[in-house]
Amino acid sequence: AINKMDLVDYSEKTYNQIVEDYTTFSKQLGIENITFIPMSAFKGDNITDPSPKMPWYRGTTLMGYLETVEIDDERMKSTPFRLPVQWVNRPNLDFRGFSGQISGGAVKPGDRIRVLPSGKESTVARIVTLDGDLEEGVAGQSVTITLEDEIDISRGDLLVEASEPAEVAKQFETTIIWMHEEPLLPGRTYLMKVGTKTVSATLTDIKYQVNVNTMEHMAAKKLELNGIGVCTISLDQAIAFDAYSNNQDTGGYILIDRLSNNTVGAGLLNFALRRSQNIVMQHVDVDKEARSTIKQQKPCILWLTGLSGAGKSTIANLVEKKLYSMGHHTYLLDGDNIRHGLNKDLGFTDGDRVENIRRISEIARLMVDAGLIVISAFISPFRSERDMARSMVEDGEFIEVHVNTPLNVAEDRDVKGLYKKARKGELKNFTGIDSPYEAPENPECRLDTTNVTPEECADKVIEYMQERGYI
Protein backbone atom coordinates (compact mmCIF):
# COMPACT_ATOMS: atom_id res chain seq x y z
CA ALA A 1 0.00 0.00 0.00
CA ILE A 2 1.74 3.14 -1.26
CA ASN A 3 0.14 5.72 1.00
CA LYS A 4 0.09 9.55 1.10
CA MET A 5 -0.13 9.92 -2.67
CA ASP A 6 -1.91 13.22 -2.02
CA LEU A 7 1.40 14.70 -0.78
CA VAL A 8 3.03 14.17 -4.20
CA ASP A 9 0.03 15.38 -6.22
CA TYR A 10 -0.87 11.78 -7.12
CA SER A 11 2.25 11.55 -9.28
CA GLU A 12 2.42 8.47 -11.49
CA LYS A 13 6.19 8.98 -11.83
CA THR A 14 6.68 8.83 -8.05
CA TYR A 15 4.49 5.74 -7.84
CA ASN A 16 6.43 3.96 -10.63
CA GLN A 17 9.76 4.75 -8.95
CA ILE A 18 8.58 3.25 -5.63
CA VAL A 19 7.28 0.17 -7.45
CA GLU A 20 10.61 -0.27 -9.22
CA ASP A 21 12.68 0.20 -6.06
CA TYR A 22 10.57 -2.11 -3.93
CA THR A 23 10.37 -4.80 -6.61
CA THR A 24 14.17 -4.92 -6.70
CA PHE A 25 14.37 -5.04 -2.90
CA SER A 26 11.67 -7.70 -2.57
CA LYS A 27 13.56 -10.12 -4.82
CA GLN A 28 16.29 -10.25 -2.16
CA LEU A 29 13.63 -11.22 0.38
CA GLY A 30 12.30 -14.02 -1.80
CA ILE A 31 8.84 -12.43 -2.17
CA GLU A 32 7.35 -13.68 -5.42
CA ASN A 33 3.97 -11.96 -5.77
CA ILE A 34 3.30 -8.33 -4.87
CA THR A 35 0.26 -6.16 -5.51
CA PHE A 36 0.97 -2.41 -5.45
CA ILE A 37 -1.90 -0.07 -4.57
CA PRO A 38 -1.43 3.76 -4.66
CA MET A 39 -3.70 5.40 -2.09
CA SER A 40 -4.37 8.19 0.34
CA ALA A 41 -5.83 6.95 3.60
CA PHE A 42 -6.48 10.55 4.71
CA LYS A 43 -8.39 11.47 1.54
CA GLY A 44 -9.97 8.04 0.99
CA ASP A 45 -8.41 7.50 -2.43
CA ASN A 46 -8.41 3.85 -3.56
CA ILE A 47 -9.56 2.62 -0.16
CA THR A 48 -13.05 1.39 -1.01
CA ASP A 49 -13.63 3.03 -4.43
CA PRO A 50 -11.32 3.78 -7.35
CA SER A 51 -9.86 7.30 -7.14
CA PRO A 52 -10.63 9.76 -9.97
CA LYS A 53 -7.42 11.59 -9.03
CA MET A 54 -5.27 8.67 -10.26
CA PRO A 55 -6.78 7.75 -13.65
CA TRP A 56 -3.46 6.20 -14.66
CA TYR A 57 -4.01 3.38 -12.08
CA ARG A 58 -6.48 0.67 -13.11
CA GLY A 59 -5.85 -1.91 -10.40
CA THR A 60 -7.83 -2.97 -7.34
CA THR A 61 -8.69 -0.86 -4.28
CA LEU A 62 -7.32 -1.74 -0.84
CA MET A 63 -10.58 -3.18 0.50
CA GLY A 64 -11.30 -4.87 -2.82
CA TYR A 65 -7.97 -6.65 -2.55
CA LEU A 66 -8.31 -7.63 1.12
CA GLU A 67 -11.78 -9.08 0.54
CA THR A 68 -10.67 -11.35 -2.32
CA VAL A 69 -7.04 -12.27 -1.58
CA GLU A 70 -6.28 -15.95 -0.95
CA ILE A 71 -5.51 -16.40 2.73
CA ASP A 72 -2.76 -18.70 3.96
CA ASP A 73 -5.13 -21.33 5.38
CA GLU A 74 -6.44 -21.94 1.86
CA ARG A 75 -2.92 -22.44 0.56
CA MET A 76 -2.06 -24.75 3.48
CA LYS A 77 -5.01 -27.02 2.65
CA SER A 78 -3.29 -27.94 -0.61
CA THR A 79 -0.01 -28.95 1.10
CA PRO A 80 0.79 -32.46 2.43
CA PHE A 81 -1.00 -33.51 5.62
CA ARG A 82 0.70 -32.54 8.89
CA LEU A 83 -0.55 -32.82 12.48
CA PRO A 84 1.81 -32.11 15.44
CA VAL A 85 0.59 -34.29 18.33
CA GLN A 86 -0.26 -32.06 21.26
CA TRP A 87 -1.97 -34.59 23.49
CA VAL A 88 -2.45 -38.36 23.65
CA ASN A 89 -6.11 -38.82 24.59
CA ARG A 90 -6.99 -42.08 26.36
CA PRO A 91 -10.07 -41.71 28.58
CA ASN A 92 -10.60 -45.50 28.67
CA LEU A 93 -9.11 -48.74 27.37
CA ASP A 94 -11.36 -48.69 24.29
CA PHE A 95 -10.25 -45.29 22.97
CA ARG A 96 -6.83 -43.90 22.13
CA GLY A 97 -6.66 -40.72 20.08
CA PHE A 98 -4.02 -38.19 19.12
CA SER A 99 -5.08 -34.57 19.43
CA GLY A 100 -3.69 -31.46 17.77
CA GLN A 101 -4.29 -28.79 15.16
CA ILE A 102 -3.82 -29.79 11.54
CA SER A 103 -1.05 -27.53 10.21
CA GLY A 104 -1.14 -28.65 6.61
CA GLY A 105 -3.23 -30.53 4.07
CA ALA A 106 -6.24 -32.74 4.72
CA VAL A 107 -6.90 -36.18 6.13
CA LYS A 108 -9.75 -38.71 5.80
CA PRO A 109 -10.57 -42.06 7.43
CA GLY A 110 -8.71 -44.74 5.50
CA ASP A 111 -5.71 -42.51 4.71
CA ARG A 112 -2.28 -43.99 5.30
CA ILE A 113 -0.20 -41.90 7.72
CA ARG A 114 3.32 -42.07 9.08
CA VAL A 115 4.54 -41.12 12.57
CA LEU A 116 7.76 -39.12 12.67
CA PRO A 117 10.51 -39.33 13.74
CA SER A 118 9.92 -43.07 14.44
CA GLY A 119 8.73 -43.81 10.88
CA LYS A 120 5.96 -46.22 11.96
CA GLU A 121 2.85 -46.30 9.74
CA SER A 122 -0.86 -46.92 10.27
CA THR A 123 -4.28 -46.08 8.81
CA VAL A 124 -6.66 -43.38 10.04
CA ALA A 125 -9.76 -44.91 11.64
CA ARG A 126 -11.72 -41.83 12.82
CA ILE A 127 -11.45 -38.06 12.90
CA VAL A 128 -13.09 -37.05 16.18
CA THR A 129 -14.30 -33.60 17.31
CA LEU A 130 -16.52 -32.34 20.12
CA ASP A 131 -19.34 -32.01 17.58
CA GLY A 132 -18.96 -35.51 16.20
CA ASP A 133 -16.81 -37.37 13.68
CA LEU A 134 -15.68 -35.69 10.45
CA GLU A 135 -15.45 -37.17 6.99
CA GLU A 136 -12.42 -34.97 6.40
CA GLY A 137 -10.14 -32.83 8.55
CA VAL A 138 -8.37 -29.85 6.97
CA ALA A 139 -5.64 -27.37 7.85
CA GLY A 140 -6.62 -25.09 10.71
CA GLN A 141 -8.97 -27.56 12.41
CA SER A 142 -8.29 -29.03 15.86
CA VAL A 143 -9.13 -32.73 15.85
CA THR A 144 -8.44 -36.06 17.52
CA ILE A 145 -7.33 -38.85 15.20
CA THR A 146 -7.63 -42.54 16.01
CA LEU A 147 -5.67 -45.21 14.17
CA GLU A 148 -6.28 -48.80 13.12
CA ASP A 149 -3.08 -50.00 14.82
CA GLU A 150 -1.74 -49.67 18.36
CA ILE A 151 1.60 -47.92 17.80
CA ASP A 152 3.76 -45.81 20.08
CA ILE A 153 3.02 -42.09 19.65
CA SER A 154 3.87 -39.29 22.10
CA ARG A 155 3.40 -35.55 22.43
CA GLY A 156 5.78 -33.82 20.03
CA ASP A 157 5.54 -36.50 17.32
CA LEU A 158 4.34 -35.46 13.87
CA LEU A 159 1.61 -37.32 11.96
CA VAL A 160 2.20 -36.95 8.23
CA GLU A 161 0.93 -38.19 4.92
CA ALA A 162 2.70 -41.51 4.33
CA SER A 163 3.32 -40.80 0.64
CA GLU A 164 4.65 -37.26 1.27
CA PRO A 165 6.41 -37.33 4.66
CA ALA A 166 8.31 -34.49 6.28
CA GLU A 167 12.10 -34.70 6.65
CA VAL A 168 13.83 -35.87 9.82
CA ALA A 169 17.15 -34.34 10.89
CA LYS A 170 19.06 -32.87 13.83
CA GLN A 171 21.37 -30.33 12.15
CA PHE A 172 20.11 -27.39 10.09
CA GLU A 173 20.81 -24.14 8.36
CA THR A 174 18.46 -21.68 9.98
CA THR A 175 17.61 -18.00 10.02
CA ILE A 176 17.47 -16.64 13.57
CA ILE A 177 15.89 -13.40 14.78
CA TRP A 178 17.47 -12.58 18.15
CA MET A 179 15.23 -10.88 20.72
CA HIS A 180 17.27 -10.64 23.92
CA GLU A 181 19.65 -8.06 25.37
CA GLU A 182 22.33 -10.68 26.00
CA PRO A 183 23.86 -11.68 22.65
CA LEU A 184 23.48 -15.04 20.95
CA LEU A 185 26.82 -16.85 21.07
CA PRO A 186 28.00 -19.95 19.18
CA GLY A 187 28.29 -22.93 21.50
CA ARG A 188 25.58 -21.80 23.90
CA THR A 189 22.66 -24.19 24.41
CA TYR A 190 18.98 -23.22 24.41
CA LEU A 191 15.64 -24.99 24.35
CA MET A 192 14.01 -25.07 20.92
CA LYS A 193 10.23 -25.39 20.67
CA VAL A 194 9.10 -26.42 17.20
CA GLY A 195 5.43 -27.29 16.95
CA THR A 196 4.58 -29.29 20.07
CA LYS A 197 8.10 -30.66 20.56
CA THR A 198 10.83 -29.17 22.76
CA VAL A 199 14.47 -30.19 22.28
CA SER A 200 17.91 -28.94 23.29
CA ALA A 201 19.59 -26.82 20.59
CA THR A 202 23.14 -25.51 20.26
CA LEU A 203 24.17 -22.78 17.85
CA THR A 204 27.26 -24.19 16.15
CA ASP A 205 28.15 -21.34 13.80
CA ILE A 206 26.99 -17.93 12.55
CA LYS A 207 27.46 -17.97 8.78
CA TYR A 208 26.59 -14.29 8.40
CA GLN A 209 24.39 -11.51 9.74
CA VAL A 210 21.86 -9.80 7.50
CA ASN A 211 21.81 -6.00 7.21
CA VAL A 212 18.05 -5.41 7.15
CA ASN A 213 18.41 -2.12 5.28
CA THR A 214 20.61 -3.31 2.42
CA MET A 215 20.28 -7.14 2.73
CA GLU A 216 24.09 -7.24 2.79
CA HIS A 217 25.69 -10.34 4.31
CA MET A 218 28.11 -9.35 7.08
CA ALA A 219 30.54 -11.48 9.10
CA ALA A 220 29.51 -11.87 12.75
CA LYS A 221 30.73 -13.73 15.83
CA LYS A 222 27.52 -13.06 17.78
CA LEU A 223 24.00 -11.73 17.27
CA GLU A 224 22.96 -8.68 19.27
CA LEU A 225 19.39 -7.61 20.13
CA ASN A 226 17.19 -7.47 16.97
CA GLY A 227 19.96 -9.02 14.90
CA ILE A 228 19.07 -11.43 12.08
CA GLY A 229 21.57 -14.11 11.15
CA VAL A 230 21.87 -17.22 9.02
CA CYS A 231 23.35 -19.89 11.27
CA THR A 232 23.89 -23.59 11.69
CA ILE A 233 22.22 -25.26 14.64
CA SER A 234 22.50 -28.73 16.15
CA LEU A 235 19.87 -30.56 18.24
CA ASP A 236 20.26 -33.28 20.84
CA GLN A 237 17.74 -35.43 18.96
CA ALA A 238 16.26 -35.65 15.49
CA ILE A 239 12.98 -33.86 14.74
CA ALA A 240 10.48 -33.98 11.90
CA PHE A 241 10.24 -30.72 9.98
CA ASP A 242 9.40 -28.93 6.75
CA ALA A 243 11.30 -25.96 5.37
CA TYR A 244 9.68 -22.77 6.70
CA SER A 245 8.93 -21.68 3.13
CA ASN A 246 6.69 -24.74 2.79
CA ASN A 247 5.04 -24.84 6.20
CA GLN A 248 5.42 -22.16 8.85
CA ASP A 249 4.13 -24.38 11.67
CA THR A 250 6.53 -27.28 11.11
CA GLY A 251 9.41 -25.07 9.96
CA GLY A 252 9.25 -22.26 12.52
CA TYR A 253 10.43 -22.33 16.11
CA ILE A 254 11.29 -20.27 19.18
CA LEU A 255 14.43 -20.39 21.33
CA ILE A 256 14.01 -20.41 25.11
CA ASP A 257 16.63 -19.62 27.75
CA ARG A 258 17.17 -22.78 29.81
CA LEU A 259 17.46 -20.92 33.11
CA SER A 260 14.97 -18.05 32.93
CA ASN A 261 12.50 -19.83 30.60
CA ASN A 262 12.22 -16.57 28.62
CA THR A 263 11.76 -16.62 24.85
CA VAL A 264 14.99 -15.13 23.49
CA GLY A 265 14.76 -15.78 19.75
CA ALA A 266 12.68 -17.02 16.85
CA GLY A 267 13.84 -18.95 13.84
CA LEU A 268 13.08 -20.45 10.45
CA LEU A 269 14.41 -23.85 9.43
CA ASN A 270 15.81 -23.49 5.91
CA PHE A 271 17.11 -27.00 5.22
CA ALA A 272 18.80 -29.97 6.89
CA LEU A 273 22.57 -30.13 6.63
CA ARG A 274 23.78 -32.99 4.50
CA ARG A 275 25.91 -34.36 7.33
CA SER A 276 22.74 -34.64 9.42
CA GLN A 277 21.55 -37.49 7.18
CA ASN A 278 24.96 -39.03 6.49
CA ILE A 279 26.23 -39.32 10.07
CA VAL A 280 24.49 -41.81 12.36
CA MET A 281 25.31 -43.17 15.81
CA GLN A 282 27.21 -46.44 15.59
CA HIS A 283 25.99 -49.23 17.88
CA VAL A 284 28.62 -50.67 20.21
CA ASP A 285 28.29 -53.87 22.24
CA VAL A 286 30.46 -52.74 25.15
CA ASP A 287 28.48 -49.86 26.66
CA LYS A 288 28.79 -47.47 29.59
CA GLU A 289 27.18 -49.89 32.02
CA ALA A 290 29.65 -52.62 31.12
CA ARG A 291 32.63 -50.28 31.40
CA SER A 292 31.55 -48.91 34.79
CA THR A 293 30.72 -52.38 36.15
CA ILE A 294 34.22 -53.67 35.51
CA LYS A 295 35.59 -50.56 37.29
CA GLN A 296 33.17 -51.03 40.21
CA GLN A 297 32.11 -47.39 40.26
CA LYS A 298 29.35 -45.12 39.04
CA PRO A 299 30.71 -42.82 36.29
CA CYS A 300 30.08 -39.12 36.78
CA ILE A 301 31.42 -35.60 36.31
CA LEU A 302 32.68 -33.69 39.35
CA TRP A 303 32.42 -30.13 38.03
CA LEU A 304 34.36 -27.70 40.24
CA THR A 305 33.48 -24.08 39.51
CA GLY A 306 34.59 -20.86 41.18
CA LEU A 307 36.63 -17.71 40.78
CA SER A 308 40.28 -17.73 39.77
CA GLY A 309 42.26 -18.38 42.93
CA ALA A 310 39.39 -20.10 44.71
CA GLY A 311 41.34 -23.36 45.01
CA LYS A 312 39.60 -25.46 42.35
CA SER A 313 42.73 -27.06 40.89
CA THR A 314 44.23 -27.78 44.31
CA ILE A 315 41.04 -29.46 45.57
CA ALA A 316 40.51 -31.34 42.27
CA ASN A 317 44.04 -32.73 42.45
CA LEU A 318 43.52 -33.87 46.05
CA VAL A 319 40.19 -35.51 45.18
CA GLU A 320 41.78 -37.46 42.34
CA LYS A 321 44.67 -38.64 44.55
CA LYS A 322 42.22 -39.88 47.18
CA LEU A 323 40.07 -41.68 44.58
CA TYR A 324 43.18 -43.21 43.00
CA SER A 325 44.36 -44.50 46.39
CA MET A 326 40.92 -46.11 46.81
CA GLY A 327 41.35 -47.96 43.50
CA HIS A 328 38.99 -45.87 41.36
CA HIS A 329 39.47 -44.92 37.71
CA THR A 330 39.53 -41.15 37.17
CA TYR A 331 40.67 -38.39 34.86
CA LEU A 332 41.31 -34.77 35.82
CA LEU A 333 40.50 -32.01 33.30
CA ASP A 334 42.10 -28.75 34.38
CA GLY A 335 41.34 -25.39 32.79
CA ASP A 336 44.92 -24.26 32.26
CA ASN A 337 46.09 -27.65 30.98
CA ILE A 338 43.29 -27.85 28.43
CA ARG A 339 44.17 -24.41 27.07
CA HIS A 340 47.69 -25.64 26.34
CA GLY A 341 46.35 -28.17 23.84
CA LEU A 342 42.78 -28.73 22.71
CA ASN A 343 41.64 -25.16 23.39
CA LYS A 344 44.82 -23.23 22.67
CA ASP A 345 43.04 -21.45 19.81
CA LEU A 346 40.53 -19.83 22.21
CA GLY A 347 40.80 -16.52 24.04
CA PHE A 348 38.78 -15.19 26.96
CA THR A 349 35.92 -13.31 25.33
CA ASP A 350 32.41 -14.42 26.31
CA GLY A 351 32.12 -16.30 23.03
CA ASP A 352 35.45 -18.09 23.53
CA ARG A 353 34.53 -19.00 27.09
CA VAL A 354 31.30 -20.57 25.86
CA GLU A 355 33.16 -22.61 23.23
CA ASN A 356 35.82 -23.59 25.80
CA ILE A 357 33.20 -25.12 28.09
CA ARG A 358 31.31 -26.73 25.19
CA ARG A 359 34.42 -28.63 24.11
CA ILE A 360 35.22 -29.65 27.68
CA SER A 361 31.65 -30.85 28.19
CA GLU A 362 31.86 -33.07 25.10
CA ILE A 363 35.14 -34.59 26.33
CA ALA A 364 33.72 -35.15 29.81
CA ARG A 365 30.63 -36.83 28.33
CA LEU A 366 32.80 -39.27 26.37
CA MET A 367 34.85 -40.05 29.48
CA VAL A 368 31.68 -40.74 31.48
CA ASP A 369 30.64 -43.11 28.69
CA ALA A 370 34.01 -44.80 29.18
CA GLY A 371 33.00 -45.46 32.81
CA LEU A 372 35.36 -42.92 34.38
CA ILE A 373 34.92 -40.47 37.21
CA VAL A 374 35.77 -37.17 35.54
CA ILE A 375 37.01 -34.28 37.65
CA SER A 376 36.92 -30.87 35.98
CA ALA A 377 38.33 -27.64 37.42
CA PHE A 378 37.19 -24.61 35.42
CA ILE A 379 36.01 -21.14 36.30
CA SER A 380 33.05 -21.81 33.95
CA PRO A 381 31.49 -18.44 34.83
CA PHE A 382 28.10 -18.81 33.09
CA ARG A 383 25.23 -20.86 34.51
CA SER A 384 23.94 -21.63 31.02
CA GLU A 385 27.19 -23.39 30.07
CA ARG A 386 27.29 -25.41 33.28
CA ASP A 387 23.67 -26.33 32.64
CA MET A 388 24.65 -27.39 29.12
CA ALA A 389 27.37 -29.65 30.53
CA ARG A 390 24.83 -31.18 32.92
CA SER A 391 22.37 -31.83 30.09
CA MET A 392 24.93 -33.88 28.15
CA VAL A 393 24.89 -36.72 30.68
CA GLU A 394 22.16 -38.67 32.39
CA ASP A 395 20.44 -37.62 35.61
CA GLY A 396 22.72 -38.18 38.59
CA GLU A 397 25.92 -38.15 36.52
CA PHE A 398 26.73 -34.46 37.06
CA ILE A 399 27.88 -33.18 40.45
CA GLU A 400 28.29 -29.40 40.56
CA VAL A 401 30.81 -28.38 43.22
CA HIS A 402 30.90 -24.67 44.01
CA VAL A 403 34.28 -23.67 45.41
CA ASN A 404 32.79 -20.68 47.18
CA THR A 405 35.51 -18.12 47.73
CA PRO A 406 34.66 -14.37 47.95
CA LEU A 407 36.30 -12.13 45.36
CA ASN A 408 38.38 -10.22 47.94
CA VAL A 409 39.82 -13.48 49.33
CA ALA A 410 40.60 -14.88 45.88
CA GLU A 411 42.20 -11.57 44.90
CA ASP A 412 44.33 -11.49 48.05
CA ARG A 413 45.69 -14.94 47.17
CA ASP A 414 46.38 -14.00 43.52
CA VAL A 415 48.86 -16.88 43.16
CA LYS A 416 49.33 -16.27 39.43
CA GLY A 417 49.28 -12.46 39.60
CA LEU A 418 46.27 -12.34 37.31
CA TYR A 419 44.10 -10.04 39.43
CA LYS A 420 46.92 -7.50 39.61
CA LYS A 421 47.17 -7.50 35.82
CA ALA A 422 43.39 -7.21 35.46
CA ARG A 423 43.24 -4.24 37.84
CA LYS A 424 45.92 -2.49 35.77
CA GLY A 425 43.93 -3.11 32.58
CA GLU A 426 46.59 -5.45 31.22
CA LEU A 427 44.24 -8.45 31.22
CA LYS A 428 40.87 -7.98 29.56
CA ASN A 429 37.70 -10.04 30.15
CA PHE A 430 38.92 -11.33 33.52
CA THR A 431 36.22 -13.05 35.56
CA GLY A 432 35.24 -11.08 38.65
CA ILE A 433 36.80 -7.84 37.41
CA ASP A 434 35.42 -6.91 33.99
CA SER A 435 33.63 -10.16 33.15
CA PRO A 436 30.81 -11.59 35.32
CA TYR A 437 30.79 -14.77 37.38
CA GLU A 438 27.36 -16.35 37.86
CA ALA A 439 27.53 -18.40 41.04
CA PRO A 440 25.62 -21.71 41.19
CA GLU A 441 22.22 -21.39 42.80
CA ASN A 442 21.73 -25.03 43.85
CA PRO A 443 25.02 -26.94 43.60
CA GLU A 444 25.18 -30.52 44.79
CA CYS A 445 28.18 -29.62 46.95
CA ARG A 446 29.37 -26.25 48.27
CA LEU A 447 32.90 -25.75 49.62
CA ASP A 448 33.83 -22.70 51.72
CA THR A 449 37.58 -22.33 51.35
CA THR A 450 37.82 -19.32 53.66
CA ASN A 451 37.55 -21.45 56.82
CA VAL A 452 38.29 -24.98 55.58
CA THR A 453 41.57 -26.39 54.26
CA PRO A 454 41.82 -27.87 50.74
CA GLU A 455 42.36 -31.30 52.34
CA GLU A 456 39.11 -30.98 54.29
CA CYS A 457 37.28 -29.80 51.14
CA ALA A 458 38.51 -32.87 49.24
CA ASP A 459 37.33 -35.12 52.09
CA LYS A 460 33.89 -33.48 51.92
CA VAL A 461 33.64 -34.30 48.18
CA ILE A 462 34.70 -37.92 48.81
CA GLU A 463 32.13 -38.19 51.60
CA TYR A 464 29.40 -36.88 49.28
CA MET A 465 30.27 -39.49 46.65
CA GLN A 466 30.30 -42.33 49.17
CA GLU A 467 26.94 -41.37 50.68
CA ARG A 468 25.29 -41.39 47.24
CA GLY A 469 26.82 -44.60 45.96
CA TYR A 470 29.23 -43.25 43.33
CA ILE A 471 32.12 -45.10 44.98
Image (tube, helix red, strand yellow):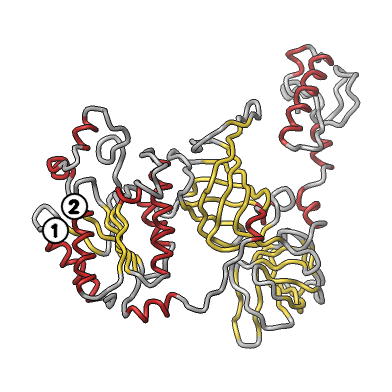
Front residue of 300 and 3: 300
Name above or below for residue 156 compared with residue 214.
below
Q: Could you tell me residue 157's position as x and y percent? A: 63, 68
Could you say where residue 39 lies in the image, as x and y percent from the top left?
Answer: 78, 24
In x, y percent, where is residue 220? Answer: 53, 34
Label 2: few (<14), some (14–19) or many (≥20) C-alpha neighbours in 10 Å: many
Q: Which residue is the site of mark 2? A: 311
**Position of residue 83 in the picture relative to residue 449 (left or right):** right
Q: In this view, does 204 lie to the left or right of 336?
A: right
Question: Which image quarter holds the N terminus?
Answer: top right
Camera-side residue of 463 and 226: 463
Identified by mark 2, the residue type is Gly
Outermost residue, left side: 451
The number of callouts visible is 2
Tag of residue 454? 1
Picture coordinates of residue 179 (x, y %)?
51, 41
Q: Which residue is drawn at 60% across and 70% down?
A: 87
Helix, strand or loop at mark 2: loop
Q: Quadrant of residue 441?
A: bottom left
Q: Do the residues labelled 1 and 2 touch (CB within 8 Å)?
A: yes
First in sequence, mark 1 or 2: give its number.
2
Amino acid type, mark 1: Pro
Q: Distance between the residues labelled 1 and 2?
A: 7 Å
Q: Residue at x 44, y 58 (%)?
A: 362
Image-quadrant location for residue 43: top right
